Image (cartoon, helix red, strand yellow):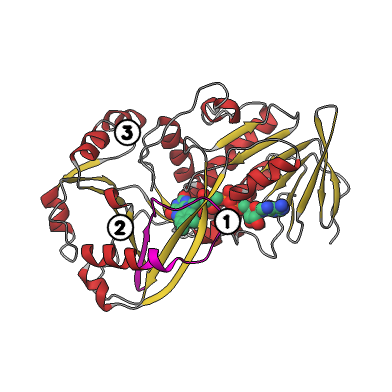
Amino acid sequence: MNLPKSADIAVIGGGIIGTSIAYHLARRGADVVLLERNRFFGEESTAKAAGGVRAHFGTEVNVRLSQISLAEFERFEAETGYSPSFVRRGYLFVLTMEAEVRAFKAKFPMWERLGTRTEWWAGDAVRARFPMMRWDDALGAVWGPDDGLADPGSAVQGYVSAGSRAGAKFFTGADVTGIKTARGRVEAVVTSAGEIAARRLVIAAGAWSGEIGRLAGVEIPVIPLRRQILVTAAIPEIPPDFPFVFDFAKSLYFHKEGPGLLIGMSNPDQAPGFDQTVDADWEVATLEAAAARMPLFERAGIARRWAGLYEMTPDRHPLIGPLPEIEGLYIVAGFSGHGFMHGPAAGKIAAEELIDGRATSLDATPLRPDRFARGAAIHEEIVI
Ligand SMILES: Cc1cc2nc3c(=O)[nH]c(=O)nc-3n(C[C@H](O)[C@H](O)[C@H](O)COP(=O)(O)OP(=O)(O)OC[C@H]3O[C@@H](n4cnc5c(N)ncnc54)[C@H](O)[C@@H]3O)c2cc1C
């Protein structure tokens, strides 16, 4: 492998976030190198994502990140030559508790102001739309008709391929093992394949971003948290337009995946850590919860199962911007389980920050990594 001796900007991590950043930087003429330690790009959290893309978040900054991404997904194929298989199949948050109904209804004025199409469905409408599910306890639901699904692998390939054409240099097998600084600023990045002199370094290492920060002696509040998924064998009764359906109180979700269903459920007792094995107790609990909502599911076998890592921050919003401790060190990580859908926006915004000095597509100041020290955390409630 022939790593360059120097680059203006080095990006650490070749998931959706790093590849999107490298692509957007190269399109704007920057001299950028991306370093990924695995054999392939996008093999970690990005490959484990359920592919959901939605605009219905509880904070304005998260909604805006989604809106930028939704527009980027629309033009992705024309720009990169790769189809991200983006389909607007819709997202439905089904609510079974009065407190949830109040919390979601309180967001309607914001969604309307920001131009995000939203419908309120009564419980009967949910039951009529999904006769194959049991929704006796549904009080109502929030429907996002413009939300949908996309394919993480294709999106990463599109960014790597179009980014390379635009001049970015992408490397796999380059494990970042050190960060050299002098007089409080970044000088070089050290990898298993050699050293690159760079005055600007972007940490986009997902759940591993805290480890990278430690290489530079900086504490980064990103915690790895296991999340797991099951995919069933074929269920012919599921119609092709079956959307992304959430049982919000149970953190349980379903969407159509090939001929079967993809099912995910958060474990509220999950301890932080890098364990990516599938937990047998979680699987039993998920099978029971899924079968209670969708009896059809009892007849379908499990075709695949996997575990991956969310990259949680204390306020469930990403960290985007310079790390004040070391000049030239940036972070774009901690998307708290929404990094696939926010990846296109993250790359665009990061390129604006690095080239123009500040983001212009949205006000990124609420996402600055020093917000916790400033007492300016922003809390997101609509997370799974
Ligand atoms: C089960 C599950 C379901 C999910 N569903 C969705 C969903 O529906 N929608 C959604 O938007 N998001 C979803 N997510 C979250 C989404 O997958 C992540 O937010 C997103 O992939 C984060 O992207 P990333 O590029 O930051 O991280 P990653 O894809 O993990 O990329 C980080 C990269 O950094 C590399 N790296 C780490 N250390 C080093 C080093 N020392 N040197 C070089 N490289 C290094 C890693 O190898 C890795 O490739 C889900 C996640 C899980 C686990």
For the residue carrying disc 1, how many other residues have a C-alpha within 10 Å: few (<14), some (14-19), or many (20+)?
some
What's under tag 2, amino acid-wise?
Pro
Q: Is residue 2 visible?
A: yes
Q: Secondary structure at mark 3?
A: helix
Single out the residue that lies furthest toward the top.
374
Judged from the image, the secondary structure of the residue bearing numbered disc 1 is loop
Disc 2 C-beta below 8 A from ligand 1: no
In the rendered image, the residue lying farthest to the right is 5
Image point (41%, 52%), residue name = 269
In the drawing, does residue 230 fall left or right of residue 294? right
Q: Which residue is mark 1?
A: 274
The residue where tag 2 is placed is 243
Q: Which residues are magenta?
A: 259-283
Residue for point 17% across, 61% down: 134
In the rendered image of this protein, does residue 219 appear above or below residue 76? above
Q: How far is mark 2 from mark 3, CA to CA?
A: 20 Å
